[in-house]
Image (cartoon, helix red, strand yellow):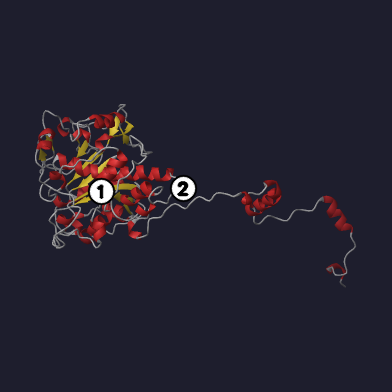
Amino acid sequence: MTSYPFDRVWHNGRGIVFATDKSPVQTSLGTPRSMPMSTTVEVQVDEVTYKSIEEDLNEDAESFTTAPEEFTDDSVVPGVEDTEAAQAIVEEIPLPVLAAPVPPWTKLEYNVSIDAYSAAQEAEEGSMESFWSYKLYRGPVDDDGKETNVTVHYCTSKETMERVCELFVGEEVLGFDLEWKPSATRQAPAKDNCSLIQIASPSRIALFHVAFFTGTDVDDLVAPTFKELMENPEVRKAGVNVKGDSTRLRNYLGIDMQGAFELSHMYKLVRYSETRSDLINRRLVALGTQVKDCLGLPMFKDLDVRRSDWSHRRLNMKQIYYSASDAYAGLQLYHVLDEMRQAMKPTPPRPHHLELNLPIRLAEPEVEESEEDIVDSSDVAADADVAAVTEEFPGYPTLKLTEDLIKAKEAEPPSHNDDTSKT
């Protein structure tokens, strides 16, 4: 793991110090500002000063919020065209426990630490240590023999957004989430309707605090590489209520998201295919429900944080913890659910991207061979061999005559129809 000068690293004796506004903007990705948290998780930032983590975690959060799950006031709207996509509806039907691996292991390089997972299970219920979060995950061992942690990038400028987005190029799946000011109306500016954008790969999470970017025009708020990632259909963006989020990006930031993937659809496909296929539909299931069911631990539920105003103040550590975990949950849920889907027999197809507006497909039933369909292979072996040769060599050349056949043909008297007999 890269080492950093002491004046750029958090220490419990000196609080958290970010670069001041007068500091030069970082120009090299090779020497980023980093702030290892008390749980040894790096948070890279670009500006402002915070108090110590312990003090900040106990401070009442006031800054941003995820959108409410239901809307009762017509003047406060989600900015989407589809009401269903704007509401995360939790199914109330009693459900059997999914056969997800515990801890939820996947083929990714970054997986949950067994020690950290066990500690979370044994922690006091409701304590910060008892919740699922990105902090539980570890990656490959570095040159010092230590497992690498998930890095969090907190960006408050378009320039930093561009540099950080370049680190996500080449990823096939990204966790995605969006936060906005809870009182934002359709007429409110982009910074109120798209206050914080979160994306996640296995090794890193990026928090783009658009509300603090300089300027108000779309060109001031959207980095080119971010737009490319969002509009690339080959990069799957996984989350809950992604349709509503993608509509906000289109309406307020001019981004036509492609590759949007609704986790609720695959969750229902995996959960109900074998027992209640009638419950497989396009209604949404809350992220916390999916995390508890598939990843084995509850999510952080502090309403002061989840419903705070993301547009007026810089993030405190509770908000970083919550918003980073939401995006990373989308990524991990996608891989856990997809590997469970692939293990199903018969295997249902993966749900389509949302922009295609296609139904969720069920698995085709496996057809068992009857005795009448079984044919003795010895009866068809010769024909099968010939067919295989013909298929493999469609332009197979004519066989050459043997030497004896050539001599016999030369000894035959010329035909009256041959050109050589004409006078």
- Viewport quadrant of the C terminus: bottom right
* x, y percent for residue 159: 20, 49
Between residue 9 and residue 368, name the one nearer to us: 368
* x, y percent for residue 60: 9, 41
Question: Which amino acid lies under the numbered mark 1 shown in the image of this protein?
Answer: Ala
Residue underneath mark 1 = 286
Residue 209 in sight here: yes
Residue under the point 15% across and 30% down? 11
Residue 36 in sight here: no
Q: Is residue 354 left or right of residue 45?
A: right
Question: Which amino acid lies under the numbered mark 2 shown in the image of this protein?
Answer: Pro
Between residue 193 and residue 19, name the one nearer to us: 193
Q: Residue furthest front?
A: 94
Q: Residues within 10 Å of mark 2 (few under 14, many from 20)?
A: some
Which mark, residue 105? none
Between residue 71 and residue 33, name the one nearer to us: 71
SS label for mark 1:
loop
Residue under the point 24% across and 32% down? 120
Marks 1 and 2, how far apart in space?
Answer: 27 Å
Which mark, residue 346? 2
The earlier-in-sequence mark between 1 and 2 is 1
Q: Residues within 10 Å of mark 1 (few under 14, many from 20)?
A: some
* x, y percent for residue 19: 13, 40
Above or below, comparing residue 246 to residue 173 in the picture: below
SS label for mark 2:
loop
